[in-house]
C-alpha cells in the first residue's frame, strides 16, 4: 500500500482547501454585508482576509519552490482569523451578544472556522515534517 505524500482533508490538499476556505470567507463578507445593509469597512473583513488566503494559496500552487513560505503565510492568516473571531468574547462579557446579529455571526464564524483551519494547517505541517524525516531516514 502506497503512503500518501500530502496531508489531505476531504481529498483536498491544503493549498486547494485554503483556496476554498478563502472563497468562503470572501463570499461570507459580501453576503453578510448585503443582507445586513452594512456599508461599513468592518463588515467586509472576512472578504479581505479571504482574498489574502486565496492569493497566497494560489501562489503556493503556482510557485511550488516557495510553497512552504506561502503556506506559512496562509497559516498565519488563519491565526489572525481566529484572533479576530475571539472578539466575540468581548461582546459576550459586555452582555451585548447579538445586539449586532450579523457582526456577531461573522465573529463566531471566524472563530469556529478559523480554529478548524489552523488545526488543518498544523496537521499538514506536522505531516510534511514526518514525511521529510522519513525520507532522510530511508
Image (tube, grey):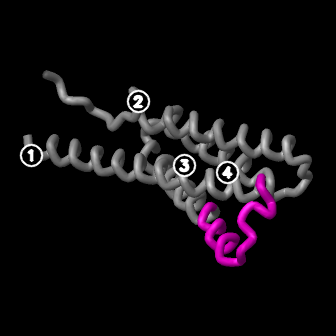
**132 left or right of 74 in image:** left
How many other residues sit within 10 Å of disc 2, few (<14), some (14-19) or many (≥20)? Answer: few
Residue 101: x %, y % from top left = 77, 55
Tell which residue pokes out farthest to the bottom in this image.
94
Residue 6: x %, y % from top left = 32, 35
**Which mark, by number, is residue 6?**
none
**Which mark, by number, is residue 137?**
1
Task: Give the distance between the C-alpha atoms of the residues marked 3 and 1, in whole angstroms.
Answer: 36 Å
Tell which residue pokes out farthest to the top in this image.
1
**Which mark, by number, is residue 49?**
4
The quadrant of the image that shows the N terminus is top left
Point out the frontmost of discs 4 and 1.
4
Rendering quarter of residue 134: top left
Tell which residue pokes out farthest to the left in this image.
138
Task: Give the distance between the C-alpha atoms of the residues marked 2 and 4, in whole angstroms.
Answer: 23 Å
Residue 126: x %, y % from top left = 29, 51
Q: Is residue 93 magenta?
A: yes
**36 left or right of 16 in image:** right
Point out the frontmost of discs 2 and 4.
2
**Which mark, by number, is residue 10?**
2
Say which residue label 3 marks. 113
Of pointers 3 and 1, the one earlier in the residue sequence:
3
Q: Is 39 above or below relative to 89?
A: above
Of pointers 2 and 1, the one earlier in the residue sequence:
2
Q: Nearer the viewer, residue 16 or 68?
A: 16
Task: Give the distance between the C-alpha atoms of the residues marked 3 and 4, in whole angstroms.
Answer: 13 Å
Which residue lies at the image location 91% right of the left edge and 47% below the top edge?
37
Q: Nearer the viewer, residue 35 or 83?
A: 35
Residue bounds of the magenta highlight: 85-102
Amino acid at each position: 500500500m502506497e503512503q500518501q505524500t500530502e496531508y489531505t482533508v476531504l481529498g483536498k490538499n491544503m493549498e486547494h482547501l485554503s483556496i476554498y476556505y478563502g472563497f468562503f470567507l470572501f463570499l461570507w463578507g459580501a453576503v453578510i454585508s448585503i443582507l445586513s445593509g452594512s456599508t461599513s469597512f468592518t463588515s467586509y473583513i472576512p472578504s479581505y482576509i479571504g482574498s489574502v488566503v486565496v492569493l497566497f494559496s494560489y501562489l503556493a500552487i503556482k510557485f511550488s519552490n516557495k510553497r512552504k513560505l506561502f503556506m506559512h503565510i496562509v497559516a498565519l492568516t488563519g491565526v489572525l482569523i481566529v484572533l479576530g473571531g475571539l472578539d466575540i468574547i468581548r461582546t459576550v462579557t459586555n452582555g451585548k451578544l447579538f445586539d449586532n446579529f450579523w457582526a456577531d455571526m461573522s465573529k463566531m464564524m471566524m472563530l469556529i472556522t478559523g480554529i478548524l483551519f489552523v488545526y488543518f494547517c498544523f496537521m499538514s505541517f506536522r505531516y510534511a515534517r514526518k514525511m521529510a524525516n522519513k525520507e532522510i531516514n530511508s
